[in-house]
Image: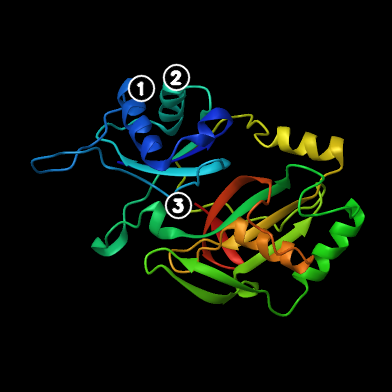
Amino acid sequence: MNVRVRFAKYGAVKFIGHLDVLRYFQKAVRRAGLKIAYSQGFHPHQIMSFASPLGVGITSEGEYMDMELTAEDTPQEIVDALNSAMVEGFTVLSARILPEPENGRKRETAMSLVTAADYLVTVKESDSFLGTKSLEELNEAWARFYGQESISVVKKVKKSNTETNVDLKPFLYGAVAGMEASLPPVEKHSDSKEYYEVPEIPDFAAEYKDTCAEKGLFSVLLRVSAGSADNIKPELVMEAFARFLGCEETEALKFRIHRLDMYTGENPELKRL
């Protein structure tokens, strides 16, 4: 039985890297008493995989993990068991049983399915790269920035240690400024009836929102391409906005990033994982 789990990562554990998150969940699954399947061979390991790894320092309420279980637990039993083994900073939000692939096809993992993601980006300090502009001026500048026909940036390619010019506009599926802003809703998955979600999902970004509201700081909602080939990071978009405002010193940009969810499919026909 294959299960997809959605979880949140917040608080101090945002400084834990992806490999440590993997090791943590391997232990948490055992503590939860779930009967997870193991691979064959001399070094068997739990059959578990994660969607797009989260960068260090970034919080999220839209992380996904796939795992194969040998017992027929219900989605609610899986969520309750995992949450009983979670430490502060991790909360399991939902679980669903994945349907069997048709015509003997190989199962697609959450990592291979991700094509887009939503992020909330909030600035940390009013005296950052945004200068002395008012919140209203910044919101208007963002509208002009996003309204451009093209948004050219230099993207570094780690594997080849090279730089390439990229037009961000085709990979920006939505970008709105302001705490009251919202992006178009995305359809929920429709391939499984065996699904459970916790009754009340906390607002994991409440601290960021409250700080922005109290201090009148700038914030944006982004929907960006997150596929394996065209993975656009929120930092790259914010650096482009800083240059649009006339700031070339982008190394010291200060903002918080919170991932809201990840999707599959082609924009605008996206679906939640």
Marks 2/1 in contact by CB < 8 Å: the verdict is: yes
In the rendered structure, the answer to whether residue 134 lies left or right of residue 257 reads: right
- Image position, residue 116 (x, y; %): 55, 60
Q: Which residue lies furthest to the bottom in this view?
A: 149
Residue 49, given in percent of the width and then of the height, sits at: 34, 46
Residue 247 falls in which quadrant of the image? bottom right
Q: Tell me the kind of residue under disc 2.
A: Ser
| Residue 52 tag number | 3
Q: Mark 1 points at which residue?
A: 32
Tell me the element at label 1: loop
Report if the CB atoms under discs 1 and 3 are less than 8 Å apart.
Answer: no
Horizontally, residue 118 falls left or right of residue 178, namely: left
Which structural element holds mark 2? Answer: helix
The quarter of the displayed image where residue 41 is located: top left
Front-most of 235 and 219?
235
Q: Can residue 13 be seen in this view?
A: yes
Return the disc, 2 or 3, that comes first in the chain's sequence. 3
Write the residue at 68% across / 48% down.
Answer: 120
Q: Position of residue 88 (x, y in %)?
A: 52, 22
Q: Residues within 10 Å of mark 3 (few under 14, many from 20)?
A: many
Q: Disc number at residue 13?
A: none
Q: Residue at x 56, y 58 (%)?
A: 233
Q: Can residue 4 be seen in this view?
A: no
CA distance for labels 1 and 3 = 24 Å
Residue 69: x and y in percent read 28, 36
Q: Mark 2 points at which residue?
A: 84
Near-viewer residue (1 or 213): 213
Residue located at (51% from left, 31% from top)? 13
Q: Quadrant of residue 71?
A: top left
